[in-house]
Image (tube, grey):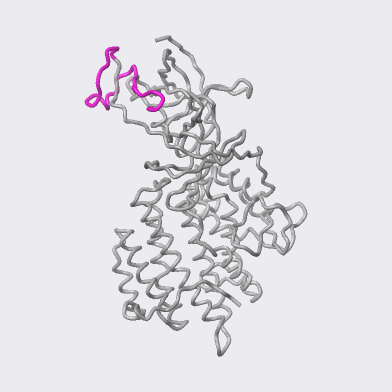
Amino acid sequence: MLTLNIPDKDAALKHAVETRPKAVADWLGRLPFASPADTAQQLLVALYALNRHPLGEDDRHALLALYRPVIARAAASLEAQLAEAGVPPHASQRQLGTLLRELHVEHSIGYKQTLLAQTNRRFGRANPKRTAEVTARLLAALGDVQTACYLTHTPPPAGLWQEMRQIHEFAETSNLAALAVDGAPAPGTAYVQAVLFALADPPHMTHGELLHTRLYLGKFGALGTLAAAPMEGHRGFAIPTTGDAAPCPYVPSPIPEGRWLDTDALCRHLHDTALRLRTGEAPRRIGLPEGMESELSQSLCKRLLKQWSGGMQRAFRRHATPGSTMHAVAGLSAIHRLLDPQQETPWPDPADAGSVAITDAGRIQAAPAPVIASRWTVDNDSAAGLALSGKPEIPLNLKVGDPLALRADDATTWSLGVIRWIRMRDAQQVELGVERLSPQVRPVWVRPLRGHRMASPEAALFVPGLAALQQKDRLLLPRYLYQIGMDADVWHPPHQYTLTFGRCLAHTPGFDLIDFTIFADEPS
């Protein structure tokens, strides 16, 4: 018997609910879609009242069919506005994230009530097709709650995975798991999509990667299949059938009373897709869903192939560091100002001619903005990186892929890392995963040479190589500055040299890490 978490009825809301389908459709058509926050707020208020109002099964099902496309449209608008949101979010971003999560929660409550009404009928037998459709809609709505939490870096609500597992078990015992009806996915497919999304390691993903993963799963998630036991030679994961924790790629196999998610066909499709994208085939020709652009899709397919192949193991042992703290500064521009407070460059910048001062040495000096380092607790450490946690008191707007300057309390120099994952345990507590890039970093100025010598100088970072690792010197550049083979002047006190950009070694939304070849070096 299903036991789902639903709110009690509230008689005080009786007159606040519109239940006439025609009137509801007219009201939905008049919503202020140009203002996503206002639209989401009105939908949330209406769904909240509807979910606490007694209503017949058929009536509720009909109303939810009207609400569903409007909720999807409003949620997409909120997601677009959250694209640049970081951690911890600003007040307006926090409000948008809360609206998105609560809107999907209330939507799922409506389908919980509809499914419970069908399964708890006193008379007659529920229509199997209707039950399959409602079950799939409910699992999809709970999957939307899951995605909203990923997009806002917040933990899922308590009971989310427990309910999804219970609903999936109900679909299987009712022989409905493979039944797709009225444009809804089969309940089993909707559940597998949610499991695969969790196994894709969303905290390591950017906003764009999360949305692309959802698009990919919407079309190809059915290639993952649940089985009682693994097939020899096939890739996959052990999946628990009880508890409220999300599936994890590091869970040992087998699990008592667990299931096996076979991802072999899915991985073969990802491998083939990545190869075809690399040879220049258009995403549409390959069959990728609309909205998956080629550049991000190619790197994402490689990432998902690695995540969904199974057998994930940590490369280095992590060590607890009780009482250890670290200072951090995020963002290329902020790190550059931290290391070079005077912000001096030997080249005039035409764009800043009216807003800068000339130093005695004749160099351009912009008014530097103060840089304040935030303080973090080191939760664990390893050769590859470290995990940090804290409650930052200053706005940071951190994102996956941001460069991070780090300095321990007893250190005199700053090291360089990159944020690889972010989580928020509550409204204040932030957790970061940081990959180490270099124990040293130096500020430089880069002036691209695109056929003339008056381009604007750009703040960049010089990342010294490590001879022990046979690692060459590198440059960390702002996004969209890098072009392979481009020449550039570099001001690296006390030297000024000219170089050619080489390979891109790492590419994130926050920077490009490249190698280079120097062909002219002049002491300044």
Q: What stretch is highlighted in magenta?
A: 337-362
In what quadrant of the picture does the N terminus appear? bottom right
Give above or below for 230 relative to 277: below
Q: Which residue lies furthest to the front in this view?
A: 323
Q: Quadrant of residue 349?
A: top left
Find residue 160 and report its horizontal and vertical position in percent. 54, 64
Find residue 227 and report its horizontal and vertical position in percent. 70, 63
Residue 266 lies in the magenta-colored region: no
Residue positioned 68% across, 55% down in the render: 237
Find residue 222 and report its horizontal and vertical position in percent. 61, 61
Query: Going by the image, does 457 lie left or right of 295?
Result: left
Q: Which residue lies furthest to the top in this view?
A: 523
Judging depth in this view, the residue of 522 and 343 nearest the camera is 343
Query: Going by the image, does 180 lie left or right of 343?
Result: right
Judging depth in this view, the residue of 33 and 366 nearest the camera is 366
Give above or below for 23 relative to 204: below
Residue positioned 45% across, 83% down in the render: 56
Q: Which residue lies furthest to the left in this view?
A: 354
Q: Residue furthest right?
A: 232
Query: Going by the image, does 481 lie left or right of 314?
Result: left
Residue positioned 27% across, 24% down in the render: 350
In what quadrant of the picture does the C terminus appear? top left
Give above or below for 390 relative to 332: below
